[in-house]
Amino acid sequence: MIASHLLAYYLAELHHDQVQKVDRYLYHLRLPEETLMDVSKRFRQEMDRGLGRDTNPTAAVKMLPTFVRSTPDGTESGDFLALDLGGTNFRVLLVKVSANGKQRVEMENQIYAIPESLMRGSGTELFDHIAECLANFLEKLGIKDKKLPLGFTFSFPCQQTKLDESILVSWTKGFKSSGVEGQDVVSLLRNAIRRRRREWEDFDIDIVAVINDTVGTMMTCGYDDHHCEIGLIVGTGTNACYMEEMRHLELVEGDEGRMCVNMEWGAFGDDGALDDLRTDFDREIDAGSLNPGKQLFEKMISGMYMGELVRLILVKMAREGIVFQGHTTPDLLATGHFQTSFVSAIENEKDNEGLLSAERILKDLGLNPSPEDCVTTQRVCQIVSTRAAHLCAASLAAVLRQIRDNKAAERLRTTIGVDGSVYKNHPQFARRLHKMVRRLVPDCDVRFLRSEDGSGKGAAMVTAVAYRLAKQQAERQSILDTLRLGREQLVAVKRRLLEEMTRGLARETHSSAAVKMLPTYVRSTPDGTERGDFLALDLGGTNFRVLLVRVRQGRRRGVEMHNKIYAIPQDLMQGTGEELFDHIVHCIADFLEYMGMRGVSLPLGFTFSFPCHQTRLNQGILLKWTKGFRASGCEGEDVVTLLKDAIHRHEEFDLDVVAVVNDTVGTMMTCGYDDPRCEVGLIVGTGTNACYMEEMRNVELVEGNAGLMCINMEWGAFGDQGELDEFCTEFDRLVDERSSNPGKQRYEKMISGMYLGEIVRNVLLDFTAKGLLFRGKLSERLKTRGIFETKFLSQIESDRLALRQVRTILQHLGLTSSTCEDSILVKEVCSVVSRRAAQLCGAGLAAVVDKIRQNRNLNHLQVTVGVDGTLYKLHPHFSTVLRETLRDLAPQCEVTLVQSEDGSGKGAALITAVACRLREAGL
């Protein structure tokens, strides 16, 4: 017992001493964590260079676009073929993917040989052979009559230009087939299949994608784990790929969504970026390789070189008398005789298996190793494989940081799909890699998932995803096409609105017209001679404003405004009319006191934003309260009289109520003060409306033919008699049916901010129910009417908003698992809905300006439109689309659109100022 204990102690001490000696000897190969962090930073810089259009040509890490735009989402299903060509044998696979409640993949495959004569013959013969083998495989399985989609794994250096187009740069692995380099391998395969079809009336297939095995690894794992967005191979060679934001991929057009980037990271260091870390052993390996100066990172990591690196170290140590008593053997000196599989065997720590393997391997190399030699050899293997794992971890850490930054996530949760003999077979490599990754990026929760047949199943998964995307895209577009309007349809909208305008103006047809064309009794726009102090009262909600507006002439021409906001308590909104108007007058008195104008009598313009019937400028009969008001004794009464009665009860001041106006007319007048050509007002906000200066001869509801009068169109009701039925979609009908006024304001419901978000919400619900969005999973919040606010459209469509911010909005709606692809689709739906709204508004405005031009018998009209409303002002593209539509549908009109400033306040005062000017002139 004592003897065996002493022996164990002796062996442990021996092991410890030898390990320390080797560690000192190979300290350059042992990289501290600070150095690995620095390597990670260098690699991140190389990634940026590879992604940039200007820096890519000189970048070592090429960051090649693969045109794979999505990982599996679990809804893929169908039968797919895969062709795996990368050596003297190739495989054909049938991959059956099912998603009916339970994801499952079944595979059948056949291996075919490629004779050496074909590897070195003509490309035509090579691809004809592949087509023949494909035919044989299909015939064996009895599926020759099916046109199945195929994914093509082609493991040779290629430049990819589309998902289904890949140009062979150069043959490797002993292939020399003529006429293939510089050609698209997918086209060559398609041509071979066509030749066979012509000769044999044989099978046909749809080649959807060409990929490399790294991408296949990511896609295979992505099917089982939807968080997988990185692929890693550490085997004979090494490479990685990951899903990058399109906005960073300058080599490809477009900046929305993601695309898988094939990093080709084995070339990291080819520009000297790793020179300070490369040892003499690394340089010796590189000098003796087939590609000196190339793939330097790969030569420090991969299985092709790991065993050779150990051999070179052992040779040097032997020559220096550190091991093998200074002896070498021909086998130890022969390149390639120390295989990477030996490294894996020697590092097996189970029951001293590794040391026993070391002894056996060294003896097979003709050596007579001592126990110290075996320990030394094991430690050399450990240092070499640990460096490889840690360098791999450093570059992976850079990729993880890139993805985390792309998502602006405090913590990243992601999965890395991994394949390759070193990762799978080496007993310690995976553990060391995982541990170091977690140390370098502690804010990333990383799962490593072993891939199963990335080059076969992976190619089929890329094809399955591409097929799913294409099928879903076609279905989505057919739905969105119902919301897209062509020019003929917009011309029809313009024509029908012109007809309705004429009906609304005519005495006989006015009562039955949808567009009421109400006279406002505003007979002139500002001419610049207006001057004086005016009060404006703006009542349209739970708050109201009192304004003092000073209009100046001459050198100091301009408008100066002072205002104060007052609340209307709920009990007054629903009390008596007397109490409501007494409160308004009390607030006016307070404002005059506040401005030091107590007792002053001023002309007043009253913006009263409730449905009214006007028979003169200073009269407005309230038809119906809206917006929560229910004050009794007001409906059917003139609001000017109610206001004057309250002023007389107050007995502190008197006011000359000159005009009752709505905000659309105020918008036109505000802009008209600065631009005498302004004869149209437009509001596109919560609601929509327009007004314009019409010839009095056409306004049959008002006596007189001379001059002009502003017409409040109330165009939101256009379509209430079926004029827009053929342009309404199922989504418009849903919004209308569930609104507070079904069948009313149909035009407004297709244009204005109150309804656009609801149209979008209904489209999203439809897409989700059909499995075209959010993986078919609805959130309860999205089912809530009105939850998708129109402001979300403006935010989502902003060019400055990254997709991650779109996802933030979706998460607010309870869609916590939405993907990047979902964000793109939501953005497209918003864009289609808002574009249609802008086009419909543009068609309506084209009708208005063309009416003015026709009234005046002009070939060309110059006119300005004053515009207000949150949708017009805040939406990033609405105004642009409106202008484009207007130019197209009214080419004889040169229209300037000017944003209005406070149409309901300043505009009311200016209407009052114009009315006072006309009154003073006796007009």
Image: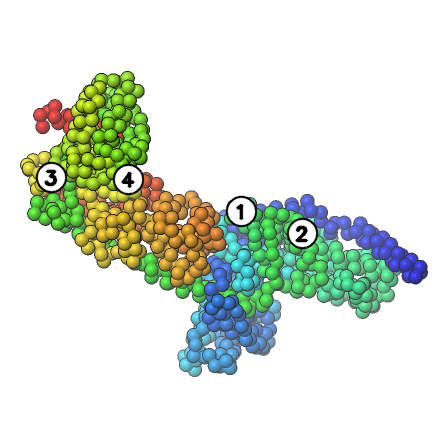
Q: What is the three-letter code of the residue carrying label 3?
A: Glu
Q: Residue at x 54, y 50 (%)?
A: 403
Query: On the rendered image, what quadrant is the C terminus found in?
Result: top left
Name which of mark 1 and mark 2 comes first in the sequence: 1
Q: What is the three-letter code of the residue carrying label 2?
A: Met
Q: CA distance from mark 3 to mark 1?
A: 61 Å
Q: Nearer the viewer, residue 189 or 906?
A: 906
Which residue matches tag 2? 436
Question: Residue 679 appears at what percent x and percent y?
Answer: 19, 37
Which residue matches tag 3? 695
Q: Nearer the viewer, mark 3 or mark 4?
A: 4
Q: CA distance from mark 3 to mark 4?
A: 37 Å
Question: Residue 775 appears at what percent x and percent y?
Answer: 45, 59
* Left or right: 641 as drawn, with respect to 123: left
Circle 3 SS class: strand
In the image, residue 40 above or below residue 538: below
Q: Nearer the viewer, residue 664 or 821?
A: 664
Q: What is the three-letter code of the residue carrying label 4?
A: Gly
Q: Nearer the viewer, mark 1 or mark 2?
A: 1
Which residue matches tag 4? 628
Name which of mark 3 and mark 1 comes first in the sequence: 1
Q: Nearer the viewer, residue 322 or 54?
A: 322
Q: CA distance from mark 2 to mark 3?
A: 81 Å
The quadrant holding residue 326 is bottom right
